[in-house]
Amino acid sequence: MYVILVYDMGEKRVAKMLKLCRRYLNWIQNSVFEGEISEGRLKKLKFEADEIMEDKDSLIIFTSKVNHGLHKEVIGCERQTIDQFL
């Protein structure tokens, strides 16, 4: 499945969530990730994120069966393109 993930964390937990999300998805902007992920890996990501989060934090996950129906438009500087793997 294709996922767009957005989080809003307390300052002390931002680095932990960033590191976690980078293990599963492609970082595209501050607190925003996208990419293909299996249901099992998404479930694991959610579990690990829940261990980092506190009451005031939020995590929003948009899912789609495919990414073909999505149109992505970047206005301004794109932080990191997902086709730049080394």
Image (cartoon, rainbow, N blue to C red):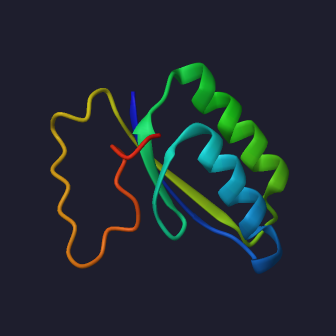
Is residue 61 at least partly visible in the picture?
yes
Residue sitting at x 44%, y 41%: 85
Residue sitting at x 70%, y 48%: 20
Q: Nearer the viewer, residue 27 or 45?
A: 27
Residue 8 sits above or below residue 82 on the image = below
Whole-percent x and y of residue 42?
58, 31
Q: Position of 50 compared to 75: left or right?
A: right
Q: Position of 7 compared to 50: left or right?
A: left
Q: Nearer the viewer, residue 39 or 26?
A: 26
Residue 77 sits above or below residue 49 on the image = below
Residue sitting at x 32%, y 68%: 78
Whole-percent x and y of residue 37?
48, 29
Residue 8 sits above or below residue 34 on the image = below
Is residue 4 at least partly visible in the picture?
no
Residue sitting at x 71%, y 57%: 17
Res 65 → quadrant: top left
Residue 6 sits above or below residue 85 on the image = below
Q: Nearer the viewer, residue 46 or 83?
A: 83
The total number of labels drawn is: 0
